[in-house]
Image (tube, grey):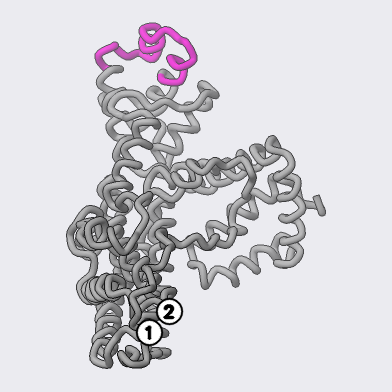
Amino acid sequence: MNGYSLADCAEIMRMHTKLKVEHGERDYKGPWQEFLRMKGLTEGNWAQVWNAWHQKMEADPGLAAKYHTYFANANVRDMTAGQANVSQDALEGVTLEQFAKISAKIQGGGDAAALVAAEGLSMDQWLAGQGAWGQKMGTISPTDPIMLQYGQLYQKYNSTIPQVGGGSVSMEQAVEQTLDKHAQIQGNRSIEVTIQNAESEFFSSNIVRHKARGVRAILNLWDRSWSDRASNPALKQVTRRAYEISIDLLENGPGNGPGAGPGYQGVSGGVDAMDIHKWSDLHTEEEAYEDTVSTILSEFKDLAAGQFMTPAESDRAQAAIRKAIQRLTPRKTKVEEIWSGTTDMTKKASLRSLLDSYIEVLEEMQEALDDWSYEGPESADSSDSSDEHDAPSPQSFQSNAPSQPSTAMATTNQESPLIAFLKGLPVIGQILKALGL
């Protein structure tokens, strides 16, 4: 279409994603425009080509599936280019190629004993090697050369979906474990925040992300309830608690509850060789430092202009933001240092995303201080002190604002909510994205 095939689109989109990982959200534009020029395109031309193909994919699920296959293959070609050949690496005397070949053929209905013997292995050797490779694959990144080349070898000998044997777990189990872990660090997101349950369900929680979500909702409620503030002491009381917790989060960080910890500050050297699960835990801990601040910052700044804080409390709020800037600046520097030395694409992409988030929240905090707007509480005689006003009726204060669609990846009507959710999770999400799903 317009001289560019669907495969061309997949290759261009792959480069778009790669340049964002390499240069960040704000700095990738120059290299991206240069790449487009090499393809004979401007950004405007490319938008026309992409939009035309995108419309066709929305109307044709088969075409969309073909695009994702092209995109996945382009990703794998890029990630394996320059990688050392590890097909003859051996564990317990079984090479990676033998492990892939025998596993694939057994999955295809082959006789295990005959296949093992044909490779010159004893059954004891095979079982030991199968277990060792399975255990190894449970500790490395989805974009590690072993994983990528295993997948290629498996498909070479059997076109069905890879099933890693030995000590690995099934995809269903892996997803279940990841969802359980996600719930442990995020809390129950189905619980609505109300004045009545804010303290018991959110403020007292040891899950810092859950606590921050409750704080944001209550601060937002104060901002939206200007006509009822004077007649609603419960709202004022719960907002006072939200203010105090905000100060603590800004000054001291997420603490040491589920999903929180030292993060990357204790890491010396790189993370390429780090066990994928250990790395994921560290990355989740580091995200908590940025995430808790970005969750509450906008509403906390609005509270200063919302006739709640005294002048002294406004000063304290600004001091807390300055403290947060001092805390997060070296953390951002550490993440940037680790990102620059990382070659594993799963880890590098996650680090780049976190680095961009750090840059954004640090700028937002400085802008909040530079544009600080303060309006103190109304005097008692100027407020309506009647008891006729009830607490505001909205009981759910989660943000429902739709996010802007990204042009970095094809979107179709075929993606289920579960897949979209899983893509946002550590490890599992990166596997799905690496596969182009």
Q: Main secondary structure of the magenta part?
A: helix
Q: Quadrant of the C terminus?
A: top right
Q: Quadrant of residue 431?
A: top left
Locate residue 69, reporting x and y percent.
61, 39
Q: Residue at x 36, y 51 (%)?
A: 189
Q: Residue 111 magenta-drawn?
A: yes
Question: Is 255 positioned to the left or the right of 289 in the image?
Answer: left
Tell which of 236 and 369 is nearer to you.
Answer: 236
Q: Amino acid at mark 2?
A: Ser
Asked whether the beta carbons under mark 2 and mark 1 sit within 8 Å of each other, the answer is yes
Kindly identify which numbered label has been placed on residue 227. 2
Q: Residues within 10 Å of mark 1 (few under 14, many from 20)?
A: some
> Residue drawn 49% across and 15% down?
108
Which residues fall within the magenta stretch? 103-125
Spot occupied by residue 395 in the image (x, y as percentages of width and height): 40, 59
Which SS class for mark 1? Answer: loop
Q: Circle 1 is placed at which residue position? A: 384
